Image (cartoon, rainbow, N blue to C red):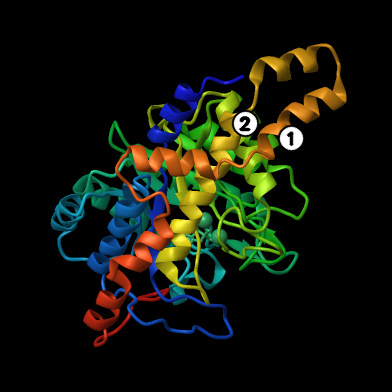
Amino acid sequence: MPDLAHVKAALRAQRIETPSWGYANSGTRFKVFPQAGVPRSPEEKIADAATVHRFTGAAPSVALHIPWDRVEDYGALARYARDLGVAIGAINTNVFQDNDYRLGSVTNPDPVIRRKATDHLLEAISIMDLTGSRDLKLWFSDGINYPGQDDIRDRQDRLAAALRQTYDRLGEDQRILLEYKLFEPAFYVTDLPDWGTSYAHCVELGERATVCIDTGHHAPGTNIEFIVAFLLRQNKLGAFDFNSRFYADDDLMVGAADPFQLFRIMNEIVRADALDPAYGINFMLDQCHNIEAKIPAIIRSVMNVQEATAKALLVDRDALREAQQEGKVLEANAVLMDAYNTDVRPLLAELRAEDGLDPDPIAAYHRSGYQQQIEAERAEGQQAGWGA
Ligand code: LRH
Ligand code: MN
Ligand code: MN
């Protein structure tokens, strides 16, 4: 059986990065329902992220999205975050919300627009220099809607050229996280539709380019843990954008739709000894809380990742390997299911109590008065939302 002290130490070391946009108003293309107390500025998003960290002890960094989190002085923003006990994490680029990008950003047939998009990626690295961020997360909405609309192969060349310029601008301790997505907003061809395309571009770029797996960006039925295992073996898994999907890019709370899938993903991470922050995987959330309370939803999400991880750490690796090598199909499966079916909530509650945290972070948040405070303090002014 796994050693409990080792399990606890691994859980203590685990880090989950929360997204600034998860604290902001969001919705579908049909309606955004604003919520009371939502941040009006990047500083207020960071304050909410720091609150999630205060109650979970496991979320010490927050990802930014540029231009949604544009400020005058990024150095000052990083210091502000540090004073609240969190760091600024990945810088997410946005080359999908400008009128110029109707036919694509870095793959646009017009070189002037490609230049503009690539300059935004380079600007994001300058921001990383100021915030001390390691990770540049790139996601492109680029693609085409109709056969013949543009040359598929030329677009790959344009993508590769922009990525090359961006990669060459990285500092020594910085890296690219290259995210893929099956479809949307492009419907016929997406220029970076899957992990294989992302992986191939990363290999072409070099060591400091790695794949980001957004768990909501696959076709139904895709075996995500296979992708995890494959990329880990190639040293090319840089990050996750965790969320849940029932249909497409739903961005619901991680572990809500399919906690078993999350366990199977974390099982591959533990199998590869890749959980510790020193290994270099950035475990991020990429979620939107359209109808539910945002801060409790993010706390819940952090806890869901912790629970899946605890179960993965409880897998009896020796028994599993033995059953696998002896070809005992049902026994091997049972080893995995035993771990998955363990109620790890008491273990995590105990761990929190040992670390001076409340064993029930959501109840502690509700008791803290933070929600009432932000609702009163943030009653005036323009709330942040997608695009603000
Ligand atoms: C695209 C995506 C990407 C964006 C984020 C807001 O669907 O997953 O990571 O930057 O959503
Ligand atoms: Mn994402
Ligand atoms: Mn997405």
Front residue of 52/236: it is 52
Q: Is residue 231 left or right of residue 73?
A: right
Q: Residues within 10 Å of mark 1 (few under 14, many from 20)?
A: some
The residue that disc 1 covers is: 337
Report if the beta carbon of the residue with label 1 is closer than 8 angstroms to ligand 2: no
Identify the amino acid type marked 2.
Glu
Question: Residue 239 in the image: x percent, y percent?
Answer: 48, 41
Quarter where residue 234 is shown: top right
Question: Residue 42 in the image: x percent, y percent?
Answer: 27, 66
Question: Residue 80 in the image: x percent, y percent?
Answer: 16, 57
Identify the amino acid type marked 1.
Met
The residue that disc 2 covers is: 268
Residue at the outermost bottom position:
380
Disc 1 on helix, strand or loop? helix
Q: Is residue 291 left or right of residue 227?
A: left
Report the residue at 50% width, 61% height from top.
Answer: 287
Report the residue at 46% width, 51% height from top.
Answer: 302
